[in-house]
Image (cartoon, helix red, strand yellow):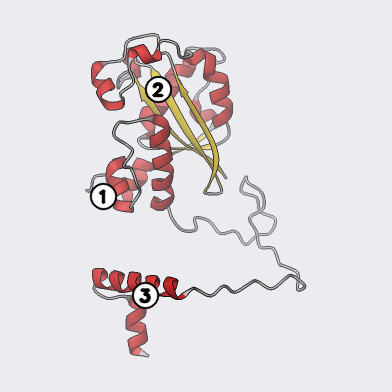
Amino acid sequence: MRQIVLDTETTGIDPSEGHRIIEIGCVELMERQLTGRNYHVYINPEREVEAEAITVHGITNEFLLDKPKFAEIADEFFEFIKGAELVIHNAAFDIGFMDTEFARIKPVRKTADYCGVVDSLAIARAKHPGQKNNLNALCKRYGVDNSNRELHGALLDAEILADVYLLLTGGQTALSLDADSDSGGGSRGMRRLGSDRPRLAVIQPTEAETQAHDAFMSALEKKAGGTVWNKLEAAE
């Protein structure tokens, strides 16, 4: 599956009041792996950026003067996201701006007609009800380094969100036992390996790695107040 983790920065908070996108940042995932393919652009919004918005992202009107207009980058942006599942934190905000921008040009495109949309904020709220689930809070909860995030930035936030999303949705999400099934990204069924295949190498941990592992497990047991595996070993 191809996923695009996406974020935008804008001139204000409401596209119905004429506010525009000024930055787009995208990070590509294939089968839940970062590919290294990104899309990033600053955009001349053809209007003033609100002072309150500048305090959030630091993008000034002067900086945007020589940047391309949305109509000039719309096709390349659309081709980058087309057919992908978009992962966005508070998706309604970004999709609302994207659809408003696409509606200004021909052909008119509606994001949901060409892309799936996953709202990572909705996932976080369901998984951690009653807690803060903004990006900074999730970084702290999942141990994601956001020390470079002094201001909001579309590409940086997309890169951080990609790490958070993978941890937030960690684990196997689907299992197909039908060898002929296809989930859009090629066959995901079982494939038997030949009996003449090379044997897998067994790599033993070094003494330092073993000690580091034991120290980590001891700290985990202390923090958790006991672990299932130690209780099972004691019962044996």
Q: In the image, which disc is placed on residue 129?
A: 1
Amino acid type at circle 2 is Phe
Categorize mark 3 by other alpha carbons within 10 Å: few (<14), some (14-19), many (20+).
few
Q: Looking at the image, which residue is at 37% across and 90% down? A: 236
User: Height in image: 215 above or below 43?
Assistant: below
**Sequence order check, earlier mark of 1 and 3:** 1
User: Height in image: 233 above or below 82?
Assistant: below
Q: Looking at the image, which residue is at 24% across and 45% down? A: 132
**Sequence order check, earlier mark of 3 and 2:** 2
**Sequence order check, earlier mark of 1 and 2:** 2
The part of the image, by quadrant, that contains residue 23 is top left
Amino acid type at circle 3 is Asp
Front residue (pair 111, 37): 37
Q: Please say if the residues under marks 3 and 2 sit with CB atoms less than 8 Å apart.
A: no
Front residue (pair 177, 84): 84
Q: Please say if the residues under marks 1 and 3 sit with CB atoms less than 8 Å apart.
A: no
Amino acid type at circle 1 is Pro
Say whether residue 129 is left or right of residue 207.
left
Q: In the image, which disc is placed on residue 97?
A: 2
Real-space Cα distance between discs 1 and 2? 27 Å
Say whether residue 41 is left or right of residue 212.
right
The percent position of residue 176, horizontal first and vertical second, equals 60, 59
Q: Secondary structure at mark 1?
A: loop
Say whether residue 92 is left or right of residue 1.
left
The percent position of residue 13, horizontal first and vertical second, equals 30, 22
Q: In the image, which disc is placed on residue 214?
A: 3
The part of the image, by quadrant, that contains residue 178 is bottom right
Q: Looking at the image, which residue is at 33% across and 42% down? A: 146
In the rendered image, the quadrant that contains the N terminus is: top right
Q: Secondary structure at mark 3?
A: helix
